[in-house]
Amino acid sequence: MFSFLRPYIFSLDPEVAHDLAIKSLKLNFIPESIFKVEGEEILNTELFGKKIKNPIGLAAGFDKSAEVYNSLYKIGYGFVEVGTVTPKRQLGNPKPRIFRLEKDEAMINRLGFNNDGLEIITKRILDDAPKGILGINIGPNKDTKNKIDDFITCLDKVHSLASYITINISSPNTRGLRDFEEKNSMNDLLESVNNLKKNNQIKKPIFIKLSPDINDSDFSNIMEIILKYKIDGIILSNTTNKNRENLLDPQKNEEGGLSGEPLKDISTQMIKKFYKENKKKITIIGVGGINSGKSAFEKISSGAQAVQLYTGMVYKGPSIVKEIKKDLISILKKEGIKSIKEAVGIKA
């Protein structure tokens, strides 16, 4: 069905197409059974001690304002991450701000954390309890005077509603956000996060979402601080505002974060590096260029306990999760692996 509709969908502005996808998912009319595959029990795994039916998640950025997460579980995702959520409602950057790079199976976005804001989103989740693992991705408002205060405000309000919380310090579309990947700034942020966790007895896992553009010189500092503050996990990685030189599409130089196929090998190499360094002390979720079982397995075998996708669904439609599950099952059987959990890090 998607392959038939794709020419029409791709004739639309990307944001119009996205809004149509959200509206369609709100109808919640597709039976879950359509997206099941035979033998998918081999994909059962755990994320921070919680059982999930498979390690394939939807990355933050699609369901920005937590409108359709329960429908997304039905189409096969093992977990869903919503957001990025900011304290105040935010319209984001001027349009146009999403660009499909069809020749590269990639996208560039400069959305700027457009979302309905903390109050509306938390009420929405309270009114529609998640039927699966729900991550909530949080960030600061564009015009805030203190970004750390914004992170703390969001964490304080969403932790009781989330299975885990992701602190997004890596979007290239909010000025100054990536400064938190610098040693002193990250230390200040995570110290505030840990103080809130201690004072409010917050037990939910905390993830940090990192940029693929981290300098090698910053790598050891980031690992040191993440271990110091006992952060539960890292998401590798967000979009890149570099790596354009080999792209074919004429829109390749649009400002914003690049996602999709060109990010695949970059994020996989980051996963291997962090996995070797942290000696399994931190859970890794791998993101970037996942559009098949093969690309998902590459990240899992490199050290990711789970993976997320978004751009892959733009290009291949909602059935992508079903296809990835089929591919993964086939790969595991071919490799003689009895459970997806056994595959984590075997090729790191």
Image (cartoon, rainbow, N blue to C red):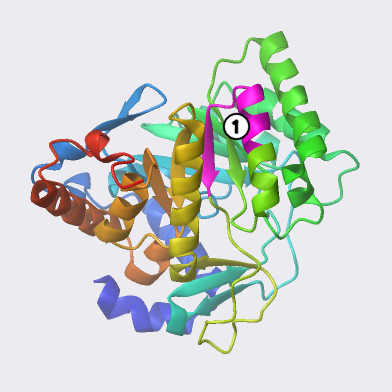
Please indicate whether residue 52 sits to the left or right of residue 250 in the image. Answer: left
Q: Residue furthest right?
A: 145
Tell me what residue is drawn at x 44 percent, y 84 percent: 103
* Coordinates of residue 114 in the picture (x, y in percent): 68, 55
> In the picture shown, does residue 138 fall above or below 163?
below
* Coordinates of residue 152 in the picture (x, y in percent): 75, 28
* Coordinates of residue 148 in the picture (x, y in percent): 80, 34
Tell me what residue is drawn at x 70 percent, y 46 percent: 218
Question: Where is mark 1, residue-wise?
Answer: 123
Mark 1 residue type: Lys
Total count of labels: 1
Q: Is residue 1 magenta?
A: no
Quarter assignment of residue 165? top right
Quarter assignment of residue 213? bottom right
Q: What kind of element bears circle 1? A: helix
Q: Between residues 287 and 118, which one lies in front from this camera angle?
A: 287
Q: Between residues 258 and 245, which one lies in front from this camera angle?
A: 245
* Coordinates of residue 277 in the picture (x, y in percent): 51, 37
Is residue 66 among the parts visible in the rendering?
A: no
Is residue 9 among the parts visible in the rendering?
A: yes
Which quadrant is home to the N terminus?
bottom left
Quarter assignment of residue 98? bottom right
Please indicate whether residue 141 sits to the left or right of residue 1 in the image. Answer: right
> In the picture shown, does residue 102 fall above or below 265?
below
Q: Residue furthest bottom?
A: 250
The magenta stretch is 222-236
Q: Is residue 228 magenta?
A: yes
